[in-house]
Amino acid sequence: MGLTHFGDQLCAALGATPTPEFVANLQSNKMGSTMGAWFVGNTVSQNLLNTGAFEVFYDGEVIFSKQKEKRLPTIPEIMGGLESAMRRDAGGRGAHAELPPEGAEAADVAGDAPSGEEL
């Protein structure tokens, strides 16, 4: 990208005169060169960082790990793990929000659903 936008100045500063032909080609099509560099860079970084990992953490505690379980979690697994971790957190360090007792059905966020009614 530096060569695309500042190639002639960089080459002159480094003593490479005349400016090499590939640098002149990059500069003549700045939009295409920039888009190409962005696309290639994105593809390379995505492939290098893709581990297939899917992990859910709560306060540093692993709630679910795809690498360990070799599968994706279900919503009830995630919610159950988060509720358990939040209960432990509430018991040990004083949580900001109170949780329903173990085994109680969860009400919706606004509190509109009567208890015992399925969500």
Image (cartoon, grey):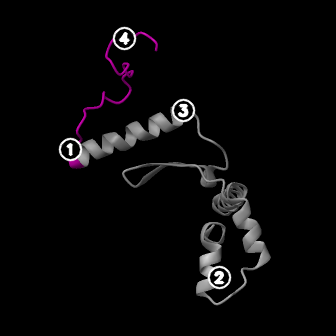
Q: Secondary structure at mark 3?
A: helix
Label 3 neighbour load within 10 Å: few <14, some 14-19, many 20+ = few
Quarter of the image with the N terminus in it: bottom right
Q: Which residue is under mark 4?
A: 113
Q: Of marks 1 and 2, which one's residue comes earlier in the chain? A: 2
Picture coordinates of residue 72, whole percent (x, y): 63, 42
Residue at position x 66%, y 45% in the image: 71
Q: Which residues are magenta?
A: 93-119
Front-lying residue, 15 or 69: 15
Q: CA distance from mark 1 to mark 2?
A: 62 Å
Q: Of marks 3 and 1, which one's residue comes earlier in the chain? A: 3
Which dot, 2 or 3, sits closer to the camera?
2
- Which SS type dominates the magenta stretch? loop
Residue at the front extreme?
18
User: Does the stretch in magenta take in 105?
Assistant: yes
Which dot, 1 or 2, sits closer to the camera?
2
Q: CA distance from mark 4 to mark 3?
A: 20 Å
In this rendering, is residue 28 above or below 91? Answer: below
Picture coordinates of residue 77, whole percent (x, y): 52, 36
Q: Of marks 4 and 3, which one's residue comes earlier in the chain? A: 3
Snapshot quadrant of residue 40:
bottom right
Q: Which residue is under mark 1?
A: 94
Q: Which residue is under mark 3?
A: 75
Residue at position x 64%, y 74% in the image: 7
Indicate the amino acid at tag 4. Answer: Ala
Residue at position x 73%, y 66% in the image: 26
